[in-house]
Amino acid sequence: MHIDGKRRGNTLADTLHIPAHVRLWVEEIAALCEPDRIYWCDGTQTEWDRIATEQVARGSMVALNPEHYPNSYLARSAPNDVARTEGRTFICAASKEEVGPTNNWIAPQEGRARMQAIFKGCMRGRTLYVVPFCMGPIEAENRVIGVQVTDSAYAVLSMRIMTRIGRDVLKTLGENEFFARCIHSVGAPRSKGEPDTAWPCNDEKWILHFPESREIWSYGSGYGGNALLGKKCLALRIASVMARDQGWLAEHMLILKVTSPENKIHYIAGAFPSACGKTNLAMLDSTLPGWKVETLGDDICWIRVGADGYFYACNPETGFFGVAPGTSNKTNRNAMQTMRSNSIFTNAALTEDGRVWWKGMTDTPPQGLTDWRGRPWDPDSGPAMHPNARFTAPIEQCPSLAEEWCRPEGVRLSAILVGGRRASAVPLVTEAFSWEHGVYMGATLASESTAASEHDLGSLRRDPFAMNPFCGYNMGDYFAHWLSFAQNEQVDKAHMPRFFMVNWFRTDENGQFIWPGFGDNIRVLKWIVERLEGAAEAVHTPVGNVPAKGSLDLDGLGMQEDDLVPLMTIDRAVWRKEAEANRNYLAGLGARVPEQLRDEQDALEKRLRA
């Protein structure tokens, strides 16, 4: 085993002072995993080109047509490695009560012993890549630095898109300064004579988080957030615990900027479960003249209270890991432009001329497709791409990117949205009565599950603040943490973000969407902004304030006020069942659910009886 530097053109380990505690830790992991080589990543384009070229030569990735997708590649995962492995994801806190009923738990000592045993020798015959990375701008006071060790070249290339990696990160990491320790392996070493061409993974998969020591151990999967440990694992599961301890919020939220014709600016965060339109909303192409939406982030949002008492949000990532199916120039032109170069596509179909394709990109599939498993596509054998096919693309290529997207202190929030896929019951947009009522809305958020999770498609699943798979501690304590900001002495109570629930997915009796969505969602954002500014009317209902007749801008939409009635109607009988389901859900979370949420539950039921 050796530092693989001079032989392959990387001299980072020799030319840059690596903090001793980082080097020692890497050596300890290498001694456990027994790789043939250790490679320190410097984050340069030269490095990207070399690693990508090696993967293409091995057959692990496909280089796309450079005329259409320069410097871009297609990766195909194993059929058993296509989504988050929530059933094999654990939080190793001191007690089961601390992680709560929404998380899987293993005692820290047991979890560590299990990982030590399973990682023993798992990288024989492979390269151990060392990826120093930073979540948030490197110069930001509240950045979080991590070091990921991995035997997956796909993870290295993707981490370069999604985070700040390499030389600059190590330069800024001081001696003995904290860093999150992230250990990843695709699994057991290859058998002798086994070709190193297929997507590596293992039937046995484990993702263990150690909140107290800020460690992550991920084994057996090379897919997405299972392998890119800076993403959901660190930026949400571990960071949510850090945020609880330090008085901030780490959330599964988009961040966008809305500018009115009068040049008034509002920043809005939004919590949506995966594949519920989060990326489309973050990159919204406005259909209203004079109204502009710009992108700051589509997935992760860290929120802190500033010295002035306002809430400030920042996106700690540098890229998008978006759901591909359904994305097109009609639905999200900005996303299509973002992924035109320097991108990685996972489990998409391949055209004869070396481009990617997925359902919804065009009205009809092109001829001669190769499916996501690398076979000539037969429509009778299933979809050409996997339903959870993804694109990984640099955020700086986004045409709608706001110039302040990486401002170290973040941007001042005006509103927080929560929303999921609901075919019935939930109105198009509902304003919360108070901060506490808004937290109740987020805490009881329900959505029809999607291909990004392991649950049955279409089944209704409770997903509080879209954090059910990502909150690293007891959900009752998480709700209490949200509620605590209303009593926080640092907070300017007059300027706390206002809560709104949205639902783009209401359907008619024929199962057709009533609201056109996509770029026309600016009309809902306009109403929200006007509510923030005291310029739009609302009707008080038992579940919140909804737009009054004539207050939602329908100009040029082809809809009449009567068409909005199904989108705004509150069916009390349906909502009494909804409230009962909410009560049962909160009761199932145990005694740590705050009394304030139980009070909000009682208040909702009382309003529905009135």
Image (cartoon, rainbow, N blue to C red):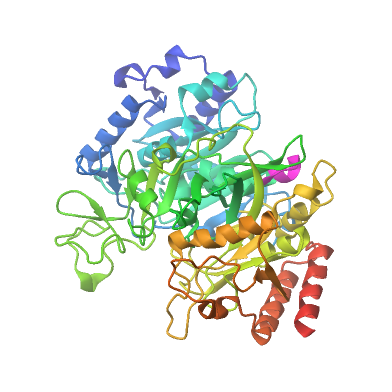
Vertically, is 541 above or below 328? below
Task: Using residue 517 as the reference point, say whether residue 391 is left or right of it.
Answer: left
Q: Is residue 111 left or right of residue 387?
A: right
Residue 443, given in percent of the width and then of the height, sits at 69, 63
The residue closer to the viewer here, 360 or 107, is 360
> What is the magenta segment's predominant secondary structure?
helix
Image quadrant where residue 581 sits = bottom right
Q: Is residue 526 above or below residue 160?
A: below
For the point 26% across and 34% down, which residue is it? 54
260 sits to left or right of 184: right
- Residue 220 visible (yes or no): no
Image x and y of residue 118, in percent: 49, 46
Q: Position of residue 159 (x, y in %)?
A: 44, 38
Specify start and end residues of the magenta stretch as a single range.
Answer: 242-249
Q: Is residue 174 above or below residue 579?
A: above
Does the magenta segment cover residue 247?
yes
Q: Residue at x 57, y 47 (%)?
A: 262
x and y percentages locating residue 607 in the rendered image:
78, 78
Most extreme residue toward the top is 15
